Amino acid sequence: MTTVAAEGLSPVEELAFARVLLDSVKAGRRGATLRMYRPAPTLAFGARDRFLPGFATAIEAARDHGFTPALRSLGGRAAAYHPGSLVIDHIEPSDSFITNTNARFTGFGQDYVEVLRRLGIDARLGEIPGEYCPGEHSVNVAGRIKAIGTAQRVVSGAWLFSSSVVVEDPDPIRAVLTDVEAALGIDWDPSTGGSISEIHPEVTIDSVAEAFAAYYADAHPDTPLSPTAEELAEVAAHADKHRL
């Protein structure tokens, strides 16, 4: 597995870069690839959100809170992340198409629970009633706060598994989601939208990033590689698909 980092990308470009890496792996220009980064404040809307009457209001609500609204190409409903979060994009080549998706959700979910538990976090696999962007493979803390949301995109020749881990600074996450979900007309329990630090204040974004880096290094010894000039050029071509 290779690790890749790209500096100076906007929130919209971050989403586009994930798709560019998926295309590179699909085409055989890269092998298994991992990217972990701390994002700028982003409100990533799901495709279904576009058809709700309050979508335009929700976009403005995100901006009012200092979060860049963007449209993601994978996942369900609106999700928020910021510099107190860790985004993990894991991409692998695959000969199968639209198979093993549930097994992948379950396997990564169980592994991620163990990564957090090693830090002393009361991590559990499963959806909390009333959580934002609900999913049966979410990872929560103490059955109270959604800590990790996962999504995947499968194309012929490769798959992308993306995860957002909200570690610190819960107030901006809860505030922006409260106004965005209200605009979209989606019922949810605001107490589920926070961060790991609310229950485990001793846990930091750095310690979580180190734990996930160690998990991936143990499973897949990595080789750092920079993005190619061609990949960076492709980011601009994909960015419009995510811009709102």
Image: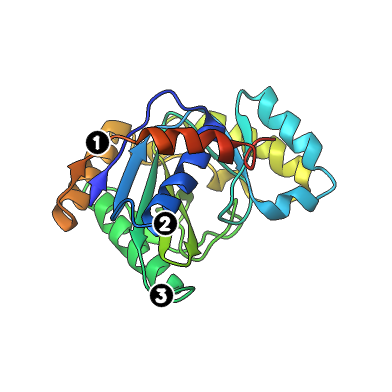
The residue lying toward the viewer, choosing from 34 and 175, is 34
| Residue 76, placed above or below residue 227 | below
Residue 85 lies in what quarter of the image?
top left
Q: Is residue 236 visible?
A: yes
Residue 185 vertical position relative to residue 66 in the rendered view, above or below: below
127 over 169 or under it: above or below: below
In front: 217, or 119? Answer: 217
SS at circle 2: strand
Residue at the disc numbered 2: 161
**Callout 1: few (<14), some (14-19), or many (20+) C-alpha neighbours within 10 Å?**
some
Q: CA distance from mark 3 to mark 2?
A: 15 Å
Amino acid type, callout 2: Phe
Q: Mark 3 or mark 2, which has the lower sequence index?
A: 3
- The Cα atoms of the two marked residues, 2 and 1, are separated by 22 Å
Q: Residue at x 59, y 47 (%)?
A: 72
Q: Which mark is residue 207?
A: 1
Q: Amino acid at mark 3?
A: Ser
Distance between mark 1 and mark 3 Cα atoms: 35 Å
Q: Are marks 1 and 3 in contact (CB under 8 Å)?
A: no
Name the residue at 72% across, 50% down. Answer: 49
In what element is the residue under mark 1?
helix
In what quadrant of the picture does the C terminus appear?
top right
